[in-house]
Image: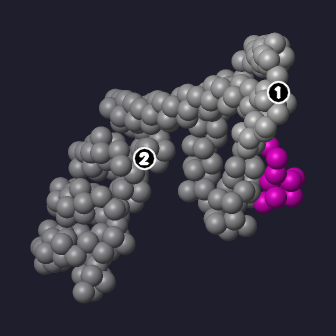
Amino acid sequence: MNCDRVNEHIADYLAGTLGPAEADELNAHFVQCAACKQEAAALSETWEMLGLLEQEQPSAALRPRFYQSLEAYRQGLESVAPAPARRRFFDWGWQGWAWSAALLVFGLGAGQWLGGRDRSQRDLASLQDEVHNMRQLVTLSLLQQQSASERLRGVDYSFRADQSDTQVLSALLHAVNYDPNVNVRLAAVDALRKFAASPAVRGSLDQSLVKQDSPMVQLALIDLIVDMRDKAAAPTLASLESASSTDKNVKEKAQWGLSQLQ
């Protein structure tokens, strides 16, 4: 099963309505595809929170009010003097007025129900905002921890953040440039791929490249620069290639990067 088919079946998978064979295929795919596994985990978290929302139901008094109104119309119409023999287009009789009353009451009830749906939609939007804020708070908090393992958890949690989250993006760029742990910096470089469409990433990778003292991080940054087709970083790659202090492997990678960006 490929990623597109996983996206088609992920809702049924989370709802537990997917067949056993297809569920096994999804689980097997999650073992091989980290991106889909992370996406499923994030959606599962939101799905569980959605389950906490109460379903809006019509008021219990709706049915009694309907019959009371219908009976009141019927009794009122029966007490009115008979209409002239000449019938007009809108002269429906008490049956027509009863149906009108029924439609009126039904419309009022439907209005209440639709108002409930609007409240549910507002609740859903509020919940989505809360989930966004929670993910942002957890990511930023973990990235500021003293323990490198906790900061790695923060980088991993950043994959759940929205692509438009500028605070998480800024924290990841700071980690790439200044985190004392090489593993954290490498993980942060990989996490920046999610924000590849942001101009802030394209305008900062070449600066991050020259700040590194680890050849491994420099190699990872060059790969990201090439994948993003960030031609503005070409002068920095050229400087790295020509500098005598540059690691041999980084020199070769910078030369390769320049050839790919031409």
| Point 64% across, 37% down: residue | 47
Residue 160 in the magenta stretch? The answer is: no
**Residue 175 versus residue 146 in the image, above or below:** below
The part of the chain drawn in magenta is 16-25
Q: Secondary structure at mark 2?
A: loop
Q: Is 240 left or right of 186, judged from the image as shown? A: left
Crowd tier of the residue under label 1, counting other residues whose Cα lies within 10 Å: few below 14, some 14–19, many 20 or above: some
Numbered circle sitting on residue 162: 2
| Image marks 2 and 1: residues in contact by CB distance under 8 Å | no
In this rendering, the answer to whether 120 lies above or below 183 is above
Task: Give percent across and percent down for residue 50.
Answer: 63, 32
Q: Which residue is mark 1?
A: 94
Q: Position of residue 126 (x, y in %)?
A: 48, 30
Observer-side mark, 2 or 1, equals: 1
Q: Quadrant of residue 76?
A: top right
On the picture, is 165 further left or further right than 7?
left
